[in-house]
Protein backbone atom coordinates (compact mmCIF):
# COMPACT_ATOMS: atom_id res chain seq x y z
CA UNK A 1 0.00 0.00 0.00
CA UNK A 2 1.25 3.46 -0.80
CA UNK A 3 1.47 6.09 1.90
CA UNK A 4 1.32 8.90 -0.63
CA UNK A 5 -1.94 10.76 -0.09
CA UNK A 6 -3.73 12.83 -2.71
CA UNK A 7 -7.03 14.48 -3.50
CA UNK A 8 -9.35 12.75 -5.95
CA UNK A 9 -8.49 15.05 -8.87
CA UNK A 10 -4.79 14.52 -8.30
CA UNK A 11 -5.48 10.87 -9.15
CA UNK A 12 -7.53 11.72 -12.23
CA UNK A 13 -10.79 10.88 -10.46
CA UNK A 14 -13.28 13.61 -11.35
CA UNK A 15 -16.82 12.98 -10.10
CA UNK A 16 -19.43 14.49 -12.37
CA UNK A 17 -18.90 16.90 -15.24
CA UNK A 18 -19.16 20.37 -13.70
CA UNK A 19 -16.21 22.72 -13.18
CA UNK A 20 -14.68 23.16 -9.70
CA UNK A 21 -13.72 26.53 -8.31
CA UNK A 22 -10.05 27.58 -8.29
CA UNK A 23 -9.29 25.84 -4.96
CA UNK A 24 -11.94 23.14 -5.30
CA UNK A 25 -12.94 23.96 -1.73
CA UNK A 26 -15.69 25.63 0.28
CA UNK A 27 -13.50 28.74 0.55
CA UNK A 28 -14.09 29.33 -3.18
CA UNK A 29 -17.31 30.92 -1.92
CA UNK A 30 -16.19 34.47 -1.15
CA UNK A 31 -16.51 35.40 2.51
CA UNK A 32 -16.18 31.87 3.89
CA UNK A 33 -13.20 30.78 5.98
CA UNK A 34 -12.23 27.46 7.61
CA UNK A 35 -10.06 26.76 10.64
CA UNK A 36 -9.08 23.62 12.54
CA UNK A 37 -7.73 22.64 15.92
CA UNK A 38 -6.48 19.04 16.06
CA UNK A 39 -5.88 17.14 19.29
CA UNK A 40 -3.49 14.20 19.05
CA UNK A 41 -2.38 13.43 22.57
CA UNK A 42 -0.80 10.24 23.88
CA UNK A 43 -2.33 7.00 22.68
CA UNK A 44 -5.96 7.77 23.38
CA UNK A 45 -6.97 11.23 22.11
CA UNK A 46 -7.66 11.77 18.40
CA UNK A 47 -10.23 14.54 18.12
CA UNK A 48 -10.60 18.25 17.41
CA UNK A 49 -12.68 21.19 16.21
CA UNK A 50 -13.40 22.54 12.73
CA UNK A 51 -14.83 26.03 12.27
CA UNK A 52 -16.68 27.15 9.13
CA UNK A 53 -16.81 30.92 9.43
CA UNK A 54 -18.89 33.03 7.03
CA UNK A 55 -17.69 36.60 7.52
CA UNK A 56 -21.23 37.93 7.83
CA UNK A 57 -21.85 36.02 11.10
CA UNK A 58 -18.45 36.76 12.58
CA UNK A 59 -19.59 40.17 13.78
CA UNK A 60 -22.27 41.65 15.99
CA UNK A 61 -25.79 41.19 14.68
CA UNK A 62 -24.75 39.06 11.72
CA UNK A 63 -27.36 36.79 10.08
CA UNK A 64 -27.49 34.79 6.88
CA UNK A 65 -30.31 32.81 5.21
CA UNK A 66 -29.85 29.12 6.01
CA UNK A 67 -31.62 25.82 6.34
CA UNK A 68 -31.10 22.25 7.47
CA UNK A 69 -31.98 18.83 6.14
CA UNK A 70 -31.96 15.86 8.51
CA UNK A 71 -31.34 12.63 6.64
CA UNK A 72 -31.39 10.70 9.90
CA UNK A 73 -31.65 12.48 13.24
CA UNK A 74 -29.39 10.25 15.33
CA UNK A 75 -27.15 13.10 16.46
CA UNK A 76 -26.63 16.11 18.68
CA UNK A 77 -26.81 19.10 16.35
CA UNK A 78 -26.91 22.07 18.70
CA UNK A 79 -29.06 24.94 17.42
CA UNK A 80 -30.98 22.86 14.89
CA UNK A 81 -34.56 23.78 15.76
CA UNK A 82 -34.08 27.56 15.74
CA UNK A 83 -32.06 27.35 12.53
CA UNK A 84 -35.03 25.65 10.85
CA UNK A 85 -37.70 27.78 12.54
CA UNK A 86 -36.19 31.15 11.62
CA UNK A 87 -34.31 30.11 8.50
CA UNK A 88 -31.25 32.02 9.66
CA UNK A 89 -27.68 31.35 10.74
CA UNK A 90 -26.39 33.67 13.48
CA UNK A 91 -23.00 32.10 14.23
CA UNK A 92 -20.09 30.28 12.66
CA UNK A 93 -20.71 26.54 12.27
CA UNK A 94 -18.48 24.36 14.42
CA UNK A 95 -17.90 20.62 14.13
CA UNK A 96 -16.41 18.27 16.75
CA UNK A 97 -16.79 14.88 18.49
CA UNK A 98 -20.15 13.88 19.95
CA UNK A 99 -19.66 14.39 23.68
CA UNK A 100 -17.67 17.59 23.14
CA UNK A 101 -20.46 19.31 21.20
CA UNK A 102 -21.87 21.01 24.30
CA UNK A 103 -18.53 22.37 25.50
CA UNK A 104 -17.87 23.66 22.00
CA UNK A 105 -21.28 25.35 21.94
CA UNK A 106 -20.58 27.04 25.27
CA UNK A 107 -17.20 28.28 24.00
CA UNK A 108 -18.83 29.57 20.81
CA UNK A 109 -21.35 31.54 22.88
CA UNK A 110 -18.46 33.05 24.87
CA UNK A 111 -16.72 34.01 21.64
CA UNK A 112 -19.86 35.75 20.36
CA UNK A 113 -20.56 37.56 23.63
CA UNK A 114 -17.05 38.99 23.45
CA UNK A 115 -17.40 40.37 19.92
CA UNK A 116 -17.40 44.19 19.75
CA UNK A 117 -20.97 45.43 19.53
CA UNK A 118 -22.44 42.44 21.38
CA UNK A 119 -22.17 43.98 24.85
CA UNK A 120 -25.96 43.90 25.28
CA UNK A 121 -26.51 40.51 23.63
CA UNK A 122 -28.79 38.25 25.70
CA UNK A 123 -29.65 35.47 23.24
CA UNK A 124 -27.79 33.73 20.43
CA UNK A 125 -28.17 30.38 18.66
CA UNK A 126 -24.82 28.56 18.45
CA UNK A 127 -24.70 25.92 15.71
CA UNK A 128 -22.47 22.94 16.51
CA UNK A 129 -22.49 19.60 14.70
CA UNK A 130 -20.77 16.39 15.67
CA UNK A 131 -19.90 12.84 14.73
CA UNK A 132 -18.83 10.05 17.05
CA UNK A 133 -15.04 9.60 17.05
CA UNK A 134 -15.12 7.21 20.02
CA UNK A 135 -13.47 4.30 18.18
CA UNK A 136 -10.17 6.17 17.81
CA UNK A 137 -10.45 8.67 20.68
CA UNK A 138 -11.42 8.38 24.35
CA UNK A 139 -14.65 10.25 23.85
CA UNK A 140 -15.57 10.27 27.55
CA UNK A 141 -12.63 12.54 28.36
CA UNK A 142 -14.18 15.45 26.41
CA UNK A 143 -10.84 17.21 25.98
CA UNK A 144 -12.04 20.22 23.98
CA UNK A 145 -11.49 23.52 25.80
CA UNK A 146 -12.50 27.09 25.09
CA UNK A 147 -8.95 27.73 23.87
CA UNK A 148 -9.24 24.96 21.28
CA UNK A 149 -12.46 26.50 19.96
CA UNK A 150 -11.00 29.99 19.86
CA UNK A 151 -7.94 28.70 18.02
CA UNK A 152 -10.14 27.14 15.32
CA UNK A 153 -12.19 30.32 14.97
CA UNK A 154 -9.32 32.78 14.92
CA UNK A 155 -7.15 30.67 12.60
CA UNK A 156 -9.92 30.34 10.00
CA UNK A 157 -8.42 30.92 6.56
CA UNK A 158 -10.04 31.94 3.27
CA UNK A 159 -7.28 30.50 1.08
CA UNK A 160 -6.71 26.85 1.99
CA UNK A 161 -8.58 24.05 3.75
CA UNK A 162 -6.60 21.26 5.36
CA UNK A 163 -8.22 17.87 4.77
CA UNK A 164 -8.10 14.35 6.15
CA UNK A 165 -7.06 13.77 9.76
CA UNK A 166 -7.49 17.35 10.93
CA UNK A 167 -9.84 19.23 13.23
CA UNK A 168 -13.16 17.46 13.72
CA UNK A 169 -11.95 14.74 11.34
CA UNK A 170 -8.90 13.76 13.40
CA UNK A 171 -10.58 10.67 14.84
CA UNK A 172 -13.32 9.85 12.33
CA UNK A 173 -13.70 6.89 9.96
CA UNK A 174 -15.92 6.29 6.96
CA UNK A 175 -16.86 3.51 4.58
CA UNK A 176 -14.44 1.07 6.23
CA UNK A 177 -11.39 3.34 6.11
CA UNK A 178 -9.95 6.37 7.90
CA UNK A 179 -12.16 9.34 7.15
CA UNK A 180 -11.96 12.99 8.10
CA UNK A 181 -12.51 16.45 6.68
CA UNK A 182 -12.99 16.88 2.94
CA UNK A 183 -14.04 19.75 0.72
CA UNK A 184 -14.91 20.53 -2.89
CA UNK A 185 -16.70 23.16 -5.00
CA UNK A 186 -18.44 23.71 -8.31
CA UNK A 187 -19.19 26.79 -10.42
CA UNK A 188 -22.42 26.73 -12.43
CA UNK A 189 -24.48 29.11 -14.53
CA UNK A 190 -27.93 29.82 -13.08
CA UNK A 191 -30.68 31.48 -15.09
CA UNK A 192 -31.22 35.16 -14.24
CA UNK A 193 -28.36 34.97 -11.73
CA UNK A 194 -25.17 34.18 -13.62
CA UNK A 195 -22.20 32.28 -12.25
CA UNK A 196 -22.82 30.68 -8.85
CA UNK A 197 -20.16 29.04 -6.69
CA UNK A 198 -21.25 26.13 -4.51
CA UNK A 199 -18.81 24.96 -1.84
CA UNK A 200 -19.06 21.91 0.40
CA UNK A 201 -17.24 20.70 3.51
CA UNK A 202 -17.87 17.27 5.07
CA UNK A 203 -16.95 15.56 8.32
CA UNK A 204 -17.11 11.93 7.15
CA UNK A 205 -17.76 9.22 9.72
CA UNK A 206 -20.37 6.86 8.29
CA UNK A 207 -20.78 3.25 7.19
CA UNK A 208 -21.22 1.50 3.88
CA UNK A 209 -18.98 0.35 1.03
CA UNK A 210 -16.69 2.99 -0.46
CA UNK A 211 -17.80 3.66 -4.02
CA UNK A 212 -15.65 5.75 -6.36
CA UNK A 213 -17.46 7.00 -9.46
CA UNK A 214 -19.69 3.94 -9.34
CA UNK A 215 -16.86 1.47 -8.61
CA UNK A 216 -17.16 -0.39 -5.26
CA UNK A 217 -13.99 -0.58 -3.16
CA UNK A 218 -14.63 -3.22 -0.45
CA UNK A 219 -12.43 -2.75 2.61
CA UNK A 220 -10.68 -6.11 2.96
CA UNK A 221 -10.01 -6.51 -0.75
CA UNK A 222 -8.46 -3.04 -0.82
CA UNK A 223 -6.33 -3.63 2.27
CA UNK A 224 -5.18 -7.06 1.13
CA UNK A 225 -6.08 -8.69 4.44
CA UNK A 226 -9.11 -9.27 6.63
CA UNK A 227 -9.45 -6.43 9.11
CA UNK A 228 -11.01 -8.01 12.19
CA UNK A 229 -11.99 -4.66 13.66
CA UNK A 230 -15.69 -3.93 13.21
CA UNK A 231 -16.59 -1.47 10.45
CA UNK A 232 -18.66 1.63 11.17
CA UNK A 233 -22.29 1.11 12.01
CA UNK A 234 -23.53 4.62 11.53
CA UNK A 235 -21.52 7.26 13.43
CA UNK A 236 -22.75 10.09 11.22
CA UNK A 237 -21.84 12.69 8.62
CA UNK A 238 -21.99 16.46 8.86
CA UNK A 239 -22.20 18.42 5.61
CA UNK A 240 -21.96 22.21 5.25
CA UNK A 241 -22.92 23.81 1.94
CA UNK A 242 -22.19 27.48 1.20
CA UNK A 243 -23.18 29.30 -1.97
CA UNK A 244 -23.22 32.82 -3.35
CA UNK A 245 -26.72 32.85 -4.83
CA UNK A 246 -29.37 34.80 -2.93
CA UNK A 247 -31.67 31.87 -2.12
CA UNK A 248 -34.24 32.02 0.64
CA UNK A 249 -34.36 29.54 3.52
CA UNK A 250 -36.97 27.33 1.84
CA UNK A 251 -34.82 26.98 -1.24
CA UNK A 252 -31.75 26.35 0.90
CA UNK A 253 -33.64 23.50 2.52
CA UNK A 254 -34.00 21.93 -0.92
CA UNK A 255 -30.27 22.40 -1.49
CA UNK A 256 -29.44 20.79 1.88
CA UNK A 257 -31.60 17.79 1.02
CA UNK A 258 -29.52 17.12 -2.11
CA UNK A 259 -26.35 17.29 -0.02
CA UNK A 260 -27.46 14.28 2.04
CA UNK A 261 -28.49 12.51 -1.18
CA UNK A 262 -24.91 13.02 -2.38
CA UNK A 263 -23.62 10.69 0.34
CA UNK A 264 -25.31 7.82 -1.50
CA UNK A 265 -22.98 8.27 -4.47
CA UNK A 266 -20.01 7.36 -2.26
CA UNK A 267 -21.61 4.19 -0.86
CA UNK A 268 -23.32 5.29 2.35
CA UNK A 269 -25.62 2.67 3.86
CA UNK A 270 -27.61 5.39 5.68
CA UNK A 271 -27.65 3.22 8.81
CA UNK A 272 -30.14 3.87 11.60
CA UNK A 273 -27.32 4.90 13.93
CA UNK A 274 -25.94 7.52 11.56
CA UNK A 275 -26.78 11.17 12.19
CA UNK A 276 -26.72 12.56 8.67
CA UNK A 277 -27.20 16.33 8.55
CA UNK A 278 -26.67 19.03 5.94
CA UNK A 279 -26.70 22.77 6.59
CA UNK A 280 -26.97 25.09 3.58
CA UNK A 281 -26.22 28.79 3.87
CA UNK A 282 -26.22 31.65 1.37
CA UNK A 283 -23.66 34.43 1.68
CA UNK A 284 -25.24 36.54 -1.10
CA UNK A 285 -27.67 39.41 -0.89
CA UNK A 286 -31.30 38.22 -1.12
CA UNK A 287 -32.51 37.89 -4.69
CA UNK A 288 -35.40 36.45 -6.63
CA UNK A 289 -34.30 33.04 -7.84
CA UNK A 290 -37.04 30.86 -9.27
CA UNK A 291 -37.29 27.23 -8.24
CA UNK A 292 -36.95 26.24 -11.89
CA UNK A 293 -33.47 27.79 -11.87
CA UNK A 294 -32.19 25.61 -9.03
CA UNK A 295 -31.37 22.48 -11.02
CA UNK A 296 -27.74 23.46 -11.77
CA UNK A 297 -27.23 24.17 -8.07
CA UNK A 298 -28.69 20.77 -7.16
CA UNK A 299 -26.27 19.10 -9.57
CA UNK A 300 -23.36 21.10 -8.17
CA UNK A 301 -24.17 20.05 -4.62
CA UNK A 302 -24.41 16.37 -5.52
CA UNK A 303 -21.06 16.43 -7.29
CA UNK A 304 -19.30 18.51 -4.64
CA UNK A 305 -20.49 16.30 -1.78
CA UNK A 306 -19.34 13.19 -3.63
CA UNK A 307 -15.89 14.64 -4.25
CA UNK A 308 -15.59 16.11 -0.75
CA UNK A 309 -16.24 12.68 0.79
CA UNK A 310 -13.64 11.10 -1.48
CA UNK A 311 -11.14 13.82 -0.58
CA UNK A 312 -11.79 13.22 3.12
CA UNK A 313 -10.72 9.58 2.71
CA UNK A 314 -8.00 9.98 0.10
CA UNK A 315 -6.11 12.60 2.16
CA UNK A 316 -6.51 10.77 5.50
CA UNK A 317 -3.71 8.65 6.91
CA UNK A 318 -3.77 5.40 8.87
CA UNK A 319 -4.48 6.24 12.52
CA UNK A 320 -3.92 4.20 15.67
CA UNK A 321 -5.79 5.47 18.70
CA UNK A 322 -7.87 4.55 21.72
CA UNK A 323 -7.15 1.05 23.06
CA UNK A 324 -4.97 0.39 20.03
CA UNK A 325 -7.90 0.65 17.62
CA UNK A 326 -6.81 1.30 14.04
CA UNK A 327 -8.46 2.72 10.99
CA UNK A 328 -6.44 2.21 7.83
CA UNK A 329 -6.13 4.74 5.04
CA UNK A 330 -7.71 3.58 1.80
CA UNK A 331 -4.88 2.39 -0.48
CA UNK A 332 -4.93 4.84 -3.36
CA UNK A 333 -3.00 2.60 -5.74
CA UNK A 334 -5.76 0.00 -5.35
CA UNK A 335 -8.45 2.62 -5.97
CA UNK A 336 -6.71 3.81 -9.13
CA UNK A 337 -6.30 0.26 -10.41
CA UNK A 338 -9.93 -0.64 -9.75
CA UNK A 339 -11.12 2.55 -11.45
CA UNK A 340 -8.83 1.94 -14.41
CA UNK A 341 -10.09 -1.63 -14.85
CA UNK A 342 -13.68 -0.36 -14.67
CA UNK A 343 -13.00 2.23 -17.35
CA UNK A 344 -13.45 5.20 -15.01
CA UNK A 345 -9.81 6.16 -15.54
CA UNK A 346 -8.01 5.84 -18.85
CA UNK A 347 -5.12 3.36 -19.10
CA UNK A 348 -1.84 4.83 -17.98
CA UNK A 349 -3.23 6.92 -15.12
Image: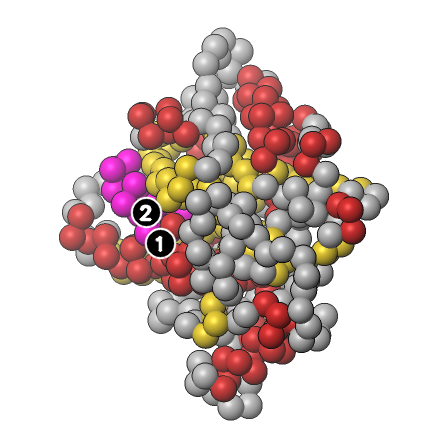
Q: Residue at x 53, y 50 (%)?
A: 233
Query: 70 and 176: which one is in front?
Result: 176
Q: Residue at x 45, y 49 (%)?
A: 271
Give the residue at mark 2: 257
Q: Residues within 10 Å of mark 1 (few under 14, many from 20)?
A: some
Give the residue at mark 1: 261
Which quadrant of the figure contains the C terminus? Answer: bottom right
Which quadrant of the figure contains the N terminus? Answer: bottom right
State left or right for residue 180 relative to residue 228.
left
State left or right for residue 170 relative to residue 159.
right
Q: Are marks 2 and 1 in contact (CB under 8 Å)?
A: yes
Give yes or no for residue 249 being in the magenta stretch: yes
Which residues fall within the magenta stretch? 240-259
Image coordinates of residue 296 in percent, x first then y, are 27, 59
Element under disc 2: helix
- Specify the label residue 155 is tagged with: none
Query: 123 and 235: which one is in front?
Result: 235
Image coordinates of residue 292 in percent, x first then y, are 16, 52
Amino acid sequence: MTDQRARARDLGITPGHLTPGPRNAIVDVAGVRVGHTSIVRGKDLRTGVTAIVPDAVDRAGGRLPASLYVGNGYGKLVGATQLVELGALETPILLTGTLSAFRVADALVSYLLDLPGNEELTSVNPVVGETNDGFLSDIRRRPITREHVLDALTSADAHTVAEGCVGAGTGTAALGFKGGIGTSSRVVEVADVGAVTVGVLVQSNFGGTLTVCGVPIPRDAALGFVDAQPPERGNSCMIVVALDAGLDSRQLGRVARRAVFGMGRTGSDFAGGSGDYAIAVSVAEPATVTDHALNPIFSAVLEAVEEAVLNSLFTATTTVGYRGHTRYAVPLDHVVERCRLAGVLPAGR
